[in-house]
Image (tube, rainbow, N blue to C red):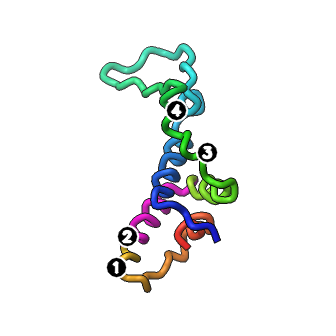
């Protein structure tokens, strides 16, 4: 059984964020010409290659079998937050049960 590091949920959250970004921004590419932005609307942040490497570089240090669990779990961001809260509760009460409605990939992160 692989034991995730304490920062695993932070990595999963980062993966969730990268999935939530439009593809042209997720890979640090410069956005194509687009229609003028609405007045008062903030332009989306475009990450440079160095910024992206700093954000996701540590992710490459995890073993492949752990990444195989993290990536599918990252598609359930709400359940990841709930799992983080579950881990906090489990510190004070080890008998707390895992939510049966969570996806199996999220359950595998906390077992």
Which residue is labeled 4 in the image?
52
Of marks 2 and 3, the one in the foreground = 3
Which residue is labeled 3 in the image?
60
Q: Earlier in the sequence, mark 2 or mark 3?
A: 3
Q: Earlier in the sequence, mark 2 or mark 4?
A: 4
Q: Are marks 4 and 3 in contact (CB under 8 Å)?
A: no
**If the image is split into quadrants, where does the C terminus sit?**
bottom right
- Checking the image for residue 63, the label placed there is none
Extreme residue in the left direction? 40
Q: Residue 82: horizontal and vertical position, in percent?
A: 43, 65
- Checking the image for residue 88, the label placed there is 2
Q: Helix, strand, or loop for circle 1?
A: helix
Which residue is labeled 1 in the image?
92
Q: Earlier in the sequence, mark 3 or mark 1?
A: 3
Determine which quarter of the picture holds residue 26.
top right
Q: Which residues are magenta?
A: 75-88
Of marks 4 and 3, the one in the foreground = 3
Q: Are marks 1 and 2 in contact (CB under 8 Å)?
A: yes
Mark 2 → mark 4, Cα distance in angstroms: 29 Å
Q: In this image, 97 relative to 75: left or right?
A: left
Mark 1 → mark 2, Cα distance in angstroms: 7 Å
Magenta segment's dominant SS is helix
């Amino acid at each position: 059984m692989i034991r995730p590091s304490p920062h695993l949920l932070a990595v999963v959250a980062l993966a969730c964020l990268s999935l939530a970004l439009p593809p042209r921004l997720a890979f640090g590419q410069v956005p194509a010409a687009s229609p003028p932005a609405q007045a008062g609307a903030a332009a989306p942040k475009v990450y440079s290659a160095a910024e992206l490497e700093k954000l996701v570089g540590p992710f490459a240090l995890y073993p492949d079998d752990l990444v195989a669990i993290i990536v599918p779990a990252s598609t359930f961001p709400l359940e990841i937050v709930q799992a983080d809260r579950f881990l906090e509760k489990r510190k004070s009460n080890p008998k707390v049960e895992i939510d049966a409605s969570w996806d199996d990939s999220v359950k595998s992160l906390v077992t």
